[in-house]
Amino acid sequence: MMKFLILLLLLVSTAYSNRQSCADEINALRSRYANELSIANMNKLIYNPKLETKSLEKLESSGGCPDKSVEYGDGYIFGFNVNNSNALVFHVASNAGSMEVACVHTKCEHTGESITTTVLDFGKYQILAGPPGSRCSENRTADSNGLCSPENSGKSGKYVRKGWVADFSRGLYQLFRALRFG
């Protein structure tokens, strides 16, 4: 039983570090696009673990082994199988008005291939030209990377971690999903 609990705690901590890594990687791309293309209102994405469920639901409808694609639906942008696909990552990461992101890493049970699915909210704002971070929306300010960050950037937006119980339950959910998909 103790080994099982240790395994679960390791999964939870790995899931959290993967979450931050997901947001950081996509925000780095968004910063690059904002700077190279002079996008004045590119928002910094905040990781929202609640979006993971939406990704898992979409993955389930594809049998867990989606082709590389982008899908729009219910106010979200889904990037399926985004590993090593620069065009797909650009498409998913370049919506300036998006504010939230989640990534789910699974394995296709038929091929053993690692699958990364990314979901972002579909931003309500059109792209504005100008120096990066110069035309941020209300309650956002420019950061040093040219992105529009929430003014409460010390916290993760409106979704704040609620302690080890929430992380533990999410870790369990991901464990059971991973076991189901391979």
Image (cartoon, helix red, strand yellow):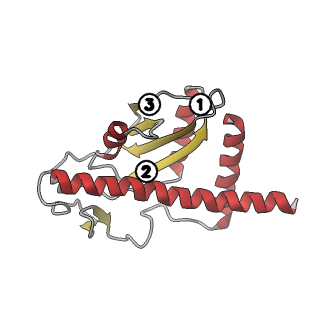
> Is 39 located above or below residue 78 in the figure?
below
Dot 3 or dot 2: first in sequence order is: 3
SS state under label 2: strand
> Is 85 located above or below residue 31 in the figure?
above
Crowd class of label 3 (few under 14; some 14 to 19; many from 20; radius 10 Å): some
Dot 1 or dot 2: first in sequence order is: 1
Look at 64% across and 53% down and name the residue there: 170
Distance from the alpha carbon under mark 1 to that under mark 2: 20 Å
Residue 118 x %, y %: 46, 43
- The mark closer to the camera, 1 or 3, is 3
Residue 143 x %, y %: 27, 69
Instruction: Identify the residue under disc 1.
Output: 64
Distance from the alpha carbon under mark 1 to that under mark 3: 12 Å
Residue 177 x %, y %: 67, 41
Residue 62 x %, y %: 55, 26
Distance from the alpha carbon under mark 3 to that under mark 2: 18 Å
Question: Is residue 41 in sight in this rendering?
Answer: no
Question: Which image quarter holds the C terminus?
Answer: top right
Horizontal side of residue 175 vs 99, given as left or right: right
Instruction: Identify the residue under disc 2.
Output: 101
Question: Is residue 92 in sight in this rendering?
Answer: yes
The dot on residue 68 is 3
